[in-house]
Amino acid sequence: MAAARPDYEQAGELKIGQVGIANLRVRTLDVPRLVEEMRERVERAPNLFARAAVVVDFGALSRCPSVGDARALIDGLRDAGVLPVALAYGTSEVEALSRELGLPLLAKFRAQYERGEPAPAVAPPPAPEPPPQRERPAPRPAAPAASPGLMHTLPVRSGQQIYAQGRDIIVCATVGAGAEVIADGSVHVYGALRGRALAGAQGDTSARIFCREFHAELVAIAGHYKVLEELPKALQGKAVQIRLENDRIMIEELP
């Protein structure tokens, strides 16, 4: 009788991909106020925020919260209707806090907060004077390589997320309700925008959103956002551009 062949196939396949996740940057450690603000967001836009995964970011505080305060905030956020899933990477104190709370650190935020100690400056020894040389014309700098936008020609359906890293995204079809398009640059939708559009994902405040037919659930530029209930009714169905001005989302009809 032949021996059974061993099964080397993994029971679970682990992939690291782009995940849409909200980041709550705590500016003032006022737990009741933070919880109430989150509760209002969930009530205003339940389809967007109810049971949404949230990363809690203590990087704006002058000192790390105590375990008790942090746990009260995590519990309060859950009661408000969202699901805190991690802490944003910060100091060694935040790392210790994450262990106490049983939450992971989200490495995506690591580069933003990591600070190395600068090495002491040491004056280099004086270089010998070079011999006189005939002047040569300076070489022309090479033109920077253009970064073309990500072209997406099919409709973006509910549950889909398209991300253009380091460039614009151009969607030549509809972005359906429940779908999400994200770009480090600007977002162009040559169809109906019914889902979510996020431009300037890495903080580019000059990024913009353009769409031919405006019905968005959410629009955001460099982290500043407006949800459906805050969007002007008069512009729904119109061709618009969306930009950031003094940290405020501005929505204007295109001619």
Image (cartoon, helix red, strand yellow):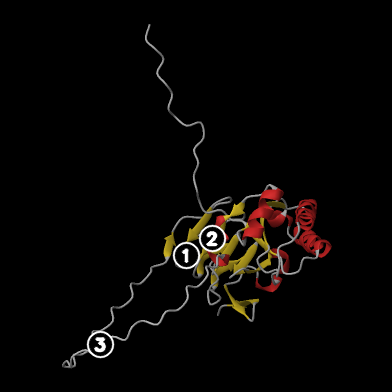
Q: CA distance from mark 2 to mark 1?
A: 8 Å
Disc 2 and disc 1 in contact, CB within 8 angstroms: yes
Up-down relation of residue 72 to residue 5 (above or below):
below
Residue 62 position in % (x across, y down): 70, 70
Camera-side residue of 65 and 51: 65
Mark 3 or mark 2: name the one nearer the start of the chain. 3
> Which amino acid type is marked by label 3?
Pro
Residue 88 position in % (x across, y down): 62, 59
The residue beneath circle 1 is 169
Residue 205 appears in the picture as rendered: yes
* Residue depicted at 73% across the width and 59% down the height: 45
> Which amino acid type is marked by label 1?
Ile
Q: Residues within 10 Å of mark 3 (few under 14, many from 20)?
A: few
Image quadrant where one finds the N terminus: top left
Q: Residues within 10 Å of mark 2 (few under 14, many from 20)?
A: many
The residue beneath circle 2 is 181
Answer with left or right where residue 139 lies relative to residue 115: left
The residue beneath circle 3 is 128
Q: CA distance from mark 3 to mark 1?
A: 52 Å
In terms of secondary structure, where does tag 3 sit? Answer: loop
Camera-side residue of 123 and 181: 123
Residue 15 position in % (x across, y down): 49, 44
Answer with left or right where residue 226 lies relative to residue 139: right
In terms of secondary structure, where does tag 2 sit? Answer: strand
Q: CA distance from mark 3 to mark 2?
A: 57 Å
Residue farthest along the top direction in this orientation: 1
> Which amino acid type is marked by label 2?
Val
Residue farthest along the left direction in this orientation: 134
Question: In which quadrant of the rendered view does residue 4 lie?
Answer: top left
